[in-house]
Amino acid sequence: MNKVVASALEAVADIPDGATLAVGGFGLCGIPELCIAALRERGVRDLVVVSNNCGVDDFGLGLLLQRRQIRKMISSYVGENREFERQFLSGELEVELVPQGTLAERLRAGGAGIPAFYTPAGVGTSVAEGKETREFDGRNYVLERGIVADFALVKAWKADRLGNLVYRRAARNFNPLAAMAGRITIAEVEQLVEVGELDPDHVHTPGIFVQRVVVGRHEKRIERRTVRRRPSPC
């Protein structure tokens, strides 16, 4: 089965208004920038986006925020986006903050068919409000639901035509978890290889989780460039 589609626009063509999206990436590292740009071009609205963060003001998911295309964010870190802050404080954007490890496990659990799990993270805080809690071995835990999204958008380094994915270094981050959580998973990749060229031991996301693959060129912008001062010669 050849899962390769011609463009990012074609890949996201059936994502409707109001869809829930699981989006890979961490900061601007490993984000599905082509699919995000295609959604911006299509003007899809009222999206619920599950992602570690929401990009920056002028790149990544921040592009969708600019056009008011996101209704709700489920995230763990949102500190690099001033437009996010403005929309949240003004009541324009609904936000559910989730501890980072809990967010990762909610995506993984949803992809594994696990409807809910108990975790100690957030017990006794606003994170636990309205949720069931139980004690195990003398410690309190809060019940968290697994996440299953209508669509998942992920970024990988390599893929074959069957949708087997390999991520590169830090860009692996939330991508494998998001890929599992989508009912339909769209992977944008830098390199496409023929079936059999990927070492099975090196595949991070098996093709069974992926329905579409799109190949393209990526800007891969650096979120925050840090340089070290040269030591004084004196």
Image (cartoon, rainbow, N blue to C red):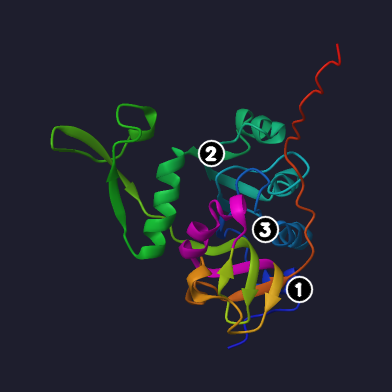
Residue depicted at x 71% and y 44%: 62
Spot occupied by residue 77 in the image (x, y as percentages of width and height): 56, 36
Q: Which residue lies furthest to the top in this view?
A: 234
Q: Which of marks 1 and 2 is nearer the N terminus?
A: 1
Dot 1 lies on which element? loop
Q: Give the range drawn in magenta.
A: 167-189
Mark before the other along the chain sequence, 3 or 2: 3
> Is 101 included in the stretch rendered in magenta?
no
Q: Which of 55 and 127 is in front in this view?
A: 55
Count residues near mark 1 (Cα–Cα under 10 Å), then give few for <14, some for 14-19, many for 20+: some
Q: Quadrant of the N terminus?
A: bottom right
Position of residue 66 measured from the top left corner of the image (x, y, whole percent): 75, 43
Of callouts 3 and 1, which one flags the residue occurring earlier in the amino acid sequence?
1
Q: Position of residue 104 (x, y in %)?
A: 44, 49
Please tell me whether mark 3 sits on a helix, a strand or a loop: loop
Answer few, some or many: residues within 10 Å of disc 2's Cα (few below 14, many 20 plus, some between 14 and 19): some
* Residue 116 placement, left or right of 57: left
Q: In which quarter of the image is residue 224?
A: top right
Which mark, by number, is residue 95? 2
| View extreme (front): residue | 234
Cα–Cα span, label 3 and label 1: 13 Å
Q: Residue 28 carries which label?
A: none
Q: Residue 7 carries which label?
A: 1
Residue at image position (44%, 60%) is 148
User: What residue type is disc 3 on?
Assistant: Pro
Amino acid identity at mark 1: Ser
Mark toward the viewer: 3 or 2: 3
Which numbered disc covers residue 32? 3
